[in-house]
Image (tube, rainbow, N blue to C red):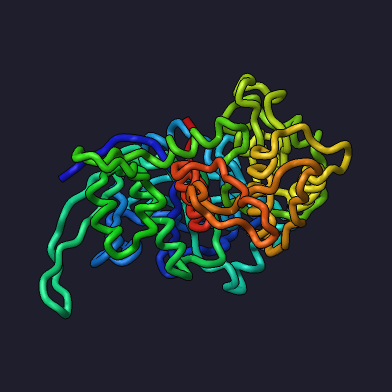
Amino acid sequence: MRTLTRTTAEERRQLPLSTAEVAIRAAEGDDGGERFAGYAAVFNSRTAIGNPLRWGFYEEIAPGAFTKTLSEGDARMLIDHDSYYVVSRVSAGSLALAEDTRGLAVDSALDTGLSYVSDLKANIKNRNITGMSFGFYVIKDDWQLEQIDTSEGPAEVEVRRILEARLVEVSAVTFPAYEDTEAELASVASALVSRGDQGAIEKRAQFRPELRDLLQLVSSDSSDRAPEVVPVERATAAAEERGGLAVHTTDTSDASWDGPANSSDLPAEESALRQAHAWVDPEGDAAAKSSYRFIHHFVGVDGDVGAASTVACTNAIGVLNGARGGTTLPDEDRQAVYKHLARHLKDAGQKAPELKQVEGEPGESTRETSTPEHAPADADGTEPAETTRTDQDARVLRMRGLAARYGLQLASS
């Protein structure tokens, strides 16, 4: 048995309609109003996260896992985890969360003055929205090995029991179960980030090598000593020191964009500033807005960072290409910012404008290692361009790309 205490990557779990018991109910009294009711989590209910026999595990939530967070936190209810669609909030008195013998019960007011709340009511009644989910950080969990019977005989599986969690939000969700393997893989990876056990990673990486790539970097030291395991958070932070913030996957929106207004609502907190921008001055104050550039996320009036704006991302790429006076960023940072913005556009199903080469700058090699000493000349007779990208840089970039692919939010130091 191994019990761990830590807070790392945010995780999400989803319940189908039959388990979540989602319903629209009449409010108490005769005012004709209606409320949302359901369960965001169910206690002692074992769920398969990924393939437990190979690269996943079973998980269950212990009664009392939310007791502390319910007394201290200020969770919101959202639609599909999108902070733009806030339905209710604990501190506003419009959301009530409670633990009962079944699980985490949700009771929310429904303000039909918000158009999307009216849509939510209709979608629930029509069974278009069919379940619930919750976003959380694991504070304490417990991992145990158990033996189960399978068609091929007894097998050993791991069971994760969540003892304490910090609740961020609950959501009514359109897809109440994992629809593809990549979503499951992202969930397993998030749990392994929390666990921090190299052996557990390696065991699963036999079946899904992407997990090793996502969660750790092994040095290429050829000495007899064991290779150093470098957490991807450290490697990513090293890459970010040059200014370009790590690529990440978030919700997107093509709504009207007002950069100054969103910047004004953004709190002067490093985590929020990093989430909303694409570049930070490596020599600036990490908690000062003046150190950041290329804001491209919507920010709520309460300071919560929400979806990425496709309009802001497209405009920012225009600046990288010389519009509005262009940018003074060094080319390496410029390319990092471009990759960050282009990823959001890709997530929105849009093709990002190409990044133009700044006049007078040498072309960047796409090779991940240095050109061999006796490499042949290019077809035009010139010597091939030498790249300055090291093996470690290449690994870091690969980690960031994989993390974006699987929806993992990588921490910064």
Give the answer, above or below, for where 145 lies relative to 68: below
Q: Residue reaching furthest bottom? A: 151
Residue 231 in picture, x, y percent from top left: 37, 39
Residue 342 in picture, x, y percent from top left: 68, 53
In the picture, measured across the screen, residue 187 lies left or right of residue 170, that is: left
Q: Quadrant of the N terminus?
A: top left
In the picture, measured across the screen, residue 391 lies left or right of residue 188, that is: right
Residue depicted at 72% across the width and 38% down the height: 295
In the picture, measured across the screen, residue 161 lies left or right of residue 78, that is: left
Residue depicted at 29% across the width and 52% down the height: 201
Say which quarter of the image contains residue 159: bottom left
Give the answer, above or below, for where 316 lies relative to 352: above
> Is residue 117 visible to us here?
no
Q: Residue reaching furthest right? A: 324
Residue 297 in picture, x, y percent from top left: 69, 43
Residue depicted at 54% across the width and 53% down the height: 367
Of residue 361 and residue 82, the one placed in the foreground of this image is 361
Give the answer, above or below, for where 91 lies relative to 309: above
Q: How many numbered discs, if any?
A: 0
Residue 175 in picture, x, y percent from top left: 52, 67
In the picture, measured across the screen, residue 228 lies left or right of residue 13, that is: left
Residue depicted at 40% across the width and 65% down the height: 19
> Is residue 296 visible to us here?
yes
Say which quarter of the image contains residue 79: bottom right
Of residue 300 and residue 227, the one placed in the foreground of this image is 227
